[in-house]
Amino acid sequence: MELLLLIVALAVILAVSYAAFNFLSVKRMEEGTDRMKEIAEAIRIGANAFIRYEYKIVGIIGAVIAVILGVLISWQTGVAFVIGAVMSATAGWVGMKIATYANVRVANSARETGDLGKTLKVAFKGGSVMGLCVAGFALFGVLIVVLLFGMALGQISDVANGTVQHGLIFPALETGFTMTLSGYALGCSVIALFNRVGGGIYTKAADMGADLVGKTEAHIPEDDPRNPATIADNVGDNVGDVAGLGSDLLESFVGAMLSGVILGCEMCVKQIVSGELLNILLLFPLIFAGVGLIGCVIGIAYLLLKKKLSDQVHRELNIATWISAGVAIVGSFLLSFFMFQNADAEALKVIGFKLGNFSPWVAAIFGIATGIIIGMISEYYTSYDFKPTKNIAGASKEGSALTITQGLATGMISCMAPVIVLAVAIFGSFAVAGMYGISCAALGMLSFVAATVSVDTYGPISDNAGGIAEMSELGKEVRAITDKLDSVGNTTAAIGKGFAIGSAALAALSMMTSYLFAFMGDINMVQNWMDSLVLNVMQPLTLCGALVGAALPYMFSGMLIEAVAKAARKMVEEVRRQFNEIKGILTGEAKPDYKTCIEISSQGSLKEMRVPCIIAIAIPVVSGFIFGAQFVGGILIGATVSAIMLAIFCGNSGGAWDNAKKYIESGGVEGHGKGSSAHDASVVGDTVGDPLKDTVGPSLDILIKIMSTISLVAVVIFSEYNLFSLLGL
């Protein structure tokens, strides 16, 4: 076991070392002119100030949660929670730092070389730091938990031997390795929730404020230095689309990994599998993740070491992803063959393995294929190379109403195909490897997460580079390069969101089995144990929970959109005030007050993020202590199904609106370029889509994962101690 874990350790060392090398490599590059340095420094200061203050708030909330977990469940769970929070926060912070260094260097590369391929390499090198840190820190934290609590403190042996640990305050409460792992996952989830929600509100408040006044009222270009909200907008790209993205997908990666490990432990506790098979079921997800990370290092290195990149940006990025996915496919095949080849055939059949030792590999292939296909579907609906986005751009000729109508239709239609693909993956992975297969599919989808995050992060870095180029008054040829990179970045962002929500659905479903194990008592019928794990949706309490759960993502989304609107309204008022009161801004004779706009976004986002985040954490716990485990089970099912559709709709419609605007700006609609009525209409559509694609959509996958994780942690208490049971209901 220890020897196999060396693969994980090697992957962590390789990824973090390569990330550090790329970080320093980017930082050594030239920043450009004095004006470029000045703007980059302002963005850097704003991003640092926001994330420091946000982490203070999250630190206080996290400390309270850690103490509660440590007192009510076990000290191991509390410590694991802190480890998870630190890993997630560190990944987000490092990603934000490199983005604020890389943005100006991308702009300078475009200025000095005039070469799209060379500029792409700089942007991708910056993005690779985030990608490698996401997977590297996630695996590092899991390795610490397994080595410290699982092996050194004997929690894995306790699971294998059937030794039951009990809580101090609640003696009936069974604690152990599954609770420790859940604590780690919960720590990652809490940081991801606050980073995504807080950063999402920040970036969209600034973006909407800048667009609504600057573009549609003053008719000045995007990122024009005369617009007071431009610096805040660029700061938002770093705190929302980079730090938030990194924490989000780190949490997805951890959830996918640990869902299989926790399920294996639960099956061993219920004596469905032996201690010997437990070791294999526990190790396989970790080793698989390590092999996938090594594949990502190879894929990322290919693009960065390639002598000359073509102007086909999307193709170059796809090649890096495909190489990473290819290594993951081959690696998972070898792991399945060697790790399960000596396992008892009857024991494998009991847990649902229909294809023997190849079952986990086939299940992982379902996940990998699903991720790639969902990405292709997202690209079709959001890229302006295809009909749906071109139709939105064409509709803009008739005004903003039809732009919004066409975008809504595109987003709604785009939900069906990904959901069908996801359903096939769920059924197929379950058919070949049982519930453990579903967790393998989730991990397969995210096995090359370092590559997908690298591709995703390069987008906001390129967007920032375009802003710096505009504010520094560089040539049009520079902005043309950054705009091309940014446009592809919108599509890669939509693809990344598809990966996130798809893997969240698979991981949440896998955790649902562990949730049922936790309160359904002993499973006696080993051969058909799955038949005993039934959540009856027609049972009134469960059905009520499902209805509440289905409504929850809509309430959560509405609160986020309202929060963005409130902060954006203040930003609009401030920009208008400066245009009216500071004479000479629009003529370029006076400098706008950037600092006030940054403060408005910071204060607005930090104030507005608290209630939605606390609701997401509190609802499953409070509901559990009132109504019990059946009701919360219904909430989890309803929320998962509802959030999947809503997240796909938000991500694709928002991305399509954004790229429809860029299609018009690039001259795609004949006779309607920048400054035309069609362009004004497309700006309105893009502004409507901003909070959908960058605040709501990315937050929904975190919502269902944090609800699943915290329910799994708390169910061991509220299944025994709840108001309805006390009243005999």
Image (spheres, helix red, strand yellow):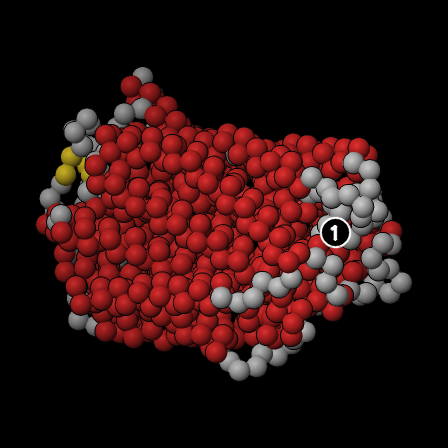
Number of numbered callouts drawn: 1
Image position of 395 with respect to 703: above or below:
below
Q: Position of residue 377 (x, y in %)?
A: 60, 63
In this rendered view, identify the residue nearer to me: 274 or 444: 444
Q: Position of residue 4 (x, y in %)?
A: 21, 67
Instruction: Give the quarter of the image for residue 16.
Output: bottom left
Q: Residue at x 78, y 60 (%)?
A: 665
Considering every residue shown, the one lying at the far bottom of the view is: 307
Residue occupied by mark 1: 224
Considering every residue shown, the one lying at the far top of the view is: 727
Q: Position of residue 430 (x, y in %)?
A: 37, 59
Q: Is residue 52 left or right of residue 686?
A: left
In this rendered view, identify the residue nearer to me: 111 or 489: 111
Q: Residue at x 49, y 31 (%)?
A: 610
In the rendered view of the protein, which quadrant contains the N terminus?
bottom left
Considering every residue shown, the one lying at the far front of the view is: 34
Mark 1 closeness class: few <14, some 14–19, many ≥20 residues within 10 Å:
many
Q: Is residue 28 visible?
A: yes
In the rendered view of the protein, which quadrant contains the C terminus?
top left
Q: Is residue 688 visible?
A: no
In this rendered view, identify the residue nearer to me: 715 or 613: 613
Image position of 725 with respect to 417: above or below:
above
| Residue type marked 1 | Asp
- Under circle 1, the secondary element is loop
Q: Is residue 173 left or right of residue 196?
A: left
Q: Is residue 425 left or right of residue 279?
A: right
Image position of 712 with respect to 424: above or below:
above
